[in-house]
Each structure stands twice: as structure tokens, then as C-alpha cells.
Image (cartoon, rainbow, N blue to C red):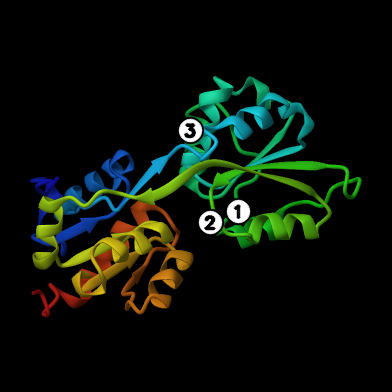
Amino acid sequence: MTVPPATGPRSNSPLSGWRVIVTRARAQSSGLVERLAEAGAWPVEVPVIEIVDPIDGGVALERALSRIEDYEWVVFTSANAVERCWRHLGDGRPLARAKVAAIGDGTAAALAEHNVIADLVPGRFVAESLVELFPCPVRLGEASVLLPCAAQAREVLPVGLRAKGWHVEVVEAYRTVSAAPDGVGFEALDDADAITFTSSSTVTGFLELAGPERVPPVVACIGPITARTAMQAGLGVDVVATPHTLDALVEALVEWAEHRGVPGNRR
């Protein structure tokens, strides 16, 4: 889907007329699409990933959440993990006895929508920062942390928390898989000015479906982990958002455009 830019005050922004590719899962892309349109860009949705059930259909997650009182902490690394857990929890009351940690404002906001206020949200929205701030347990090896996360998630959190003395139960809450190619969206790649990556999975998903030769001139990543994945894949990264939020991603792209103008190597 292509969304025309806003006609309000920001239609004269440096992004006016830019075609910007949004690679997020279609169910999650609306927030970024709207922000880009408000900034004067022409967002084009090319979803390269889908969020689907875990392989076991959520049995392990449901089992873990049924004994939520056994955990001192529940750590949420994404809004996807929050939403998948709430399919089983129903509301926030089962979390009343546990402390809750969240990585990122988006994750904390997803919790707040269910009337749960996170006890710990690191200033930098990466797992390393959460490990650094996370308290040590009073009784080493006896206190438990529940970590519902994506399949094949980074090992930084469980390894770091175990090193601090916590027993960590990692439970697959969802999987990220490649989306079916969208012919209409893919046609827009050749005329695009920029592409946004909001996770490492969007980088790998795009490259699997389209290849590096179809990456638009300007690459914008939501944070350092995503940027590192892109660079390890051989892509040049022009924009990295700070903080690692959708708003900051759009503002960083606006700032890049303000100083550089429309990319000269548009195909």
C-alpha cells in the first residue's frame, strides 16, 4: 500500500516527495506509515516478515503463564511478546505479584495498554542495557525470570541474567517468518529513495526476498542491533535512530534529508 503524504504544515519537510519503503509486518506497519506520511513522504508498504504462532501453537507459553506466580520477574522484549502473552493472560491481574521489565518504549506502551506499568525500562532499548540494570536475586539460583520471546532470539538476555544468578525460563511466544512477496510493492523498489528497517528480521527478510541489488539508496535503521545486521550483510547504513523508536527513526530520516537532499543515485 502507498500512502500519500500529509497536506498539513509538514508537507514542505525535507522528506516531501520521497518514496520510503516500510518493511515491517503488515499488521504492525500503520504507525510508521502514518508518521512518514505526516512528515511529507510517500510510504510504500513492502512487508517482508510475518508474526506467527510458535511451533507448538503456544502450548509452552500457556503452561508457563499458568504458573506466573512462580516468577519474580517477567521480561518483555517486544510488543509482539506482550500481545502473545495477553492471549493467554486475558488481563494484567496475574502479573500482580511479579515485577515486569520491558525493552523499549513501544513494549512499555503495549503493557500500559493492558494497564500494566513496567517496573524497569532501560534508557537504551537494547538487551545489554537491561542486563546491566537488572538487580541480582536475593537467593542465587532460586529466583526465576520468565522470558517470553521470539524464536531464535538473541542470547544476550538469558546469558546475562543467568550470570547474575537468576534462573531464566525462555519460552517461545511467536515466530518471525518471511512474508509472501507483494508484486505491487516490489515494483516500487526501483523508484524508492529510502528503506526503513525496524528489526534484524526485516533486514534478513528483505534480502531473502529482494536481494541487495534492490535496496534503495538510503538505508534507515531503528537501532544499533538492526544496523549491525544490515552492515554485516554488506549494506551501507545512513541513518540510525536515537532513541530507538519509530518517531526517532522518522526524525532522523528527516534530518538526513535536510542535510543531503533527495538521493542522487535514484534508479
Residue sitting at 28 percent across and 70 percent down?
A: 219
Q: CA distance from mark 3 to mark 2?
A: 19 Å
Q: Earlier in the sequence, mark 1 or mark 3?
A: 3
Q: Secondary structure at mark 2?
A: loop
On the image, the x and y values in percent for residue 157 come to 66, 56
Frontmost residue, 129 versus 45: 45
Asked whether, in this view, residue 192 is left or right of residue 103, the answer is left
Frontmost residue, 248 versus 187: 187
Residue sitting at 50 percent across and 33 percent down?
A: 84
Q: Which residue is mark 1?
A: 122
Instruction: Say whether residue 73 is visible.
Output: yes
Q: Which residue is mark 2?
A: 125
Q: CA distance from mark 1 to mark 3?
A: 20 Å
Residue sitting at 25 percent across and 69 percent down?
A: 211
Q: Secondary structure at mark 1?
A: loop
Residue 58, image quadrant: top right
Q: Secondary structure at mark 3?
A: helix
On the image, the x and y values in percent for residue 59 come to 59, 30
CB within 8 Å, label 3 to label 2: no
CB within 8 Å, label 1 to label 2: yes
Is 83 situated above or below 258?
A: above
* Amino acid type for the residue under numbered disc 3: Glu
Is 5 situated above or below 195?
A: above
* Amino acid type for the residue under numbered disc 2: Phe
On the image, the x and y values in percent for residue 2 come to 12, 48
* Amino acid type for the residue under numbered disc 1: Pro
Q: Which residue is mark 3?
A: 83
Residue 21, image quadrant: bottom left
